[in-house]
Image (cartoon, rainbow, N blue to C red):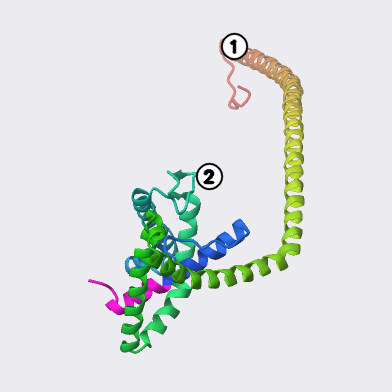
């Protein structure tokens, strides 16, 4: 039923639970400025990381080629695992090992949108960078070594669960043996965690001048951006006013030029009409004169013929008619 052999699956769980514990120490060392041994257990693991990332590997291996699918899928899987773990621990012990109530978009303080994004980013990088190296190392280990490590780690985990549970319900105070075992289990995690925090603190201290310069730069940059936005809004307002004035002046010039053009065209058309009228009148007068002259000539010709007929005079040439 598992996508990997049983021994490999256990080793993967413990490996990612240990990586998760380191991430917790580093994160809270930076944000809180001190070492905090995170997690429910005394040992060097945070089981919710191991469970969450193992589920991501099992479910999302086919989608490694799609970063959006891998990102949102792994974020959803790990957020659900975190929600279940937080609710179960609170229901049993009435304690919170994490509380996101101060973050925006949280659900009863157990999960929040910011850590949803953190889960997606961490698991996506883990799938691309961490998982191939870890899978190669486990694949090269002999079976006897895998079996021995799994037996030892499971035994330590069971003892840690029992001791941690006894501690939180108050039994370790009554039973000194349990208290000694709890201290013995917690000593390695405190020692290693302190060394990790010291390293982180040294890095942060060395990086403080650069961080301060960066913070000053960001403050100056944000101030300049605010000024630029204010100037941009003012300039845009001036541009809108100038554009409105230009449009109004353009409309007025168009209207005035239209009126002037109409007046000139009207005057030219009226002149053309008058000229045409004069030409037509002349043509009509000339036509009337020519028609009258033609009628007169015809009448005269007809009269001559009539007279010639009466006097019995004939002409061979009729061209005069």
What is the secondary structure assignment of the residue under circle 2?
loop
Which residue was labeled with disc 2?
A: 102
Say if 242 sits above or below 201 in the image: above
- Please identify the quadrant where the N terminus is shown: bottom left
Say if 43 sits above or below 264 in the image: below
Which residue was labeled with disc 1?
A: 311
Q: Give the spatial CA distance, label 2 vs label 1.
A: 143 Å
Q: Is residue 219 left or right of residue 199?
A: right
Judge by depth and name the residue closer to the eye, 69 or 268.
69
Q: Is residue 216 left or right of residue 49?
A: right
Judge by depth and name the residue closer to the eye, 185 or 120.
185
Say if 38 sits above or below 152 in the image: above
Q: Is residue 14 left or right of residue 199?
A: left
User: Residue 12, image x and y in percent?
Assistant: 37, 74
Q: Work out whether mark 2 precedes mark 1 in sequence or the reverse, and give the earlier one.
A: 2
What is the secondary structure assignment of the residue under circle 1?
loop
Judge by depth and name the residue closer to the eye, 143 or 272.
143
Q: How dense is the environment of label 1, judged by Cα within 10 Å: few (below 14), some, or many (20 and up)? A: few
Q: Is residue 214 left or right of residue 74?
A: right
- Magenta span contains residue 31: no
Residues rendered magenta in the picture = 1-15
User: Residue 25, image x and y in percent?
Assistant: 54, 64
Q: How dense is the environment of label 2, judged by Cα within 10 Å: few (below 14), some, or many (20 and up)? A: few
């Amino acid at each position: 039923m598992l996508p990997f052999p049983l021994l490999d699956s256990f080793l993967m769980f413990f490996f990612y639970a240990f990586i998760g514990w380191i991430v917790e120490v580093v994160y809270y060392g930076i944000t809180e400025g001190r070492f905090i041994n995170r997690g429910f257990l005394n040992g060097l693991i945070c089981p919710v990381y191991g469970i969450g990332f193992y589920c991501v590997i099992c479910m999302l291996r086919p989608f490694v080629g799609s970063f959006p699918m891998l990102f949102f899928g792994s974020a959803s899987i790990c957020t659900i695992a975190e929600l279940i773990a937080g609710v179960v621990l609170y229901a049993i012990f009435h304690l919170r090992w994490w509380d996101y109530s101060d973050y925006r978009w949280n659900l009863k303080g157990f999960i929040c949108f910011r850590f949803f994004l953190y889960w997606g980013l961490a698991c996506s990088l883990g799938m691309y960078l961490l998982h191939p190296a870890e899978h190669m190392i486990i694949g090269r280990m002999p079976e006897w070594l895998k079996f021995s490590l799994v037996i030892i780690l499971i035994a330590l985990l069971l003892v840690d669960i029992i001791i941690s549970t006894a501690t939180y319900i108050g039994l370790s105070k009554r039973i000194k043996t349990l208290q000694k075992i709890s201290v013995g289990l917690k000593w390695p995690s405190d020692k290693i965690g302190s060394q990790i925090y010291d390293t982180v603190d040294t890095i942060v201290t060395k990086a403080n001048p650069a961080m301060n310069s960066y913070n000053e730069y960001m403050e100056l940059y944000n101030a300049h951006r605010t000024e630029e936005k204010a100037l941009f809004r003012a300039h845009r307002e001036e541009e809108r006013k100038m554009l409105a004035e230009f449009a109004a002046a353009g409309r007025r010039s168009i209207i005035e030029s239209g009126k002037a053009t109409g007046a000139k065209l009207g005057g030219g058309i009226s002149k053309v009409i008058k000229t045409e009228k004069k030409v037509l009148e002349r043509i009509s007068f000339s036509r009337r004169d020519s028609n009258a002259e033609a009628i007169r000539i015809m009448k005269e010709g007809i009269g001559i013929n009539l007279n010639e007929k009466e006097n019995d005079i004939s002409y061979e040439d009729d061209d005069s008619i």
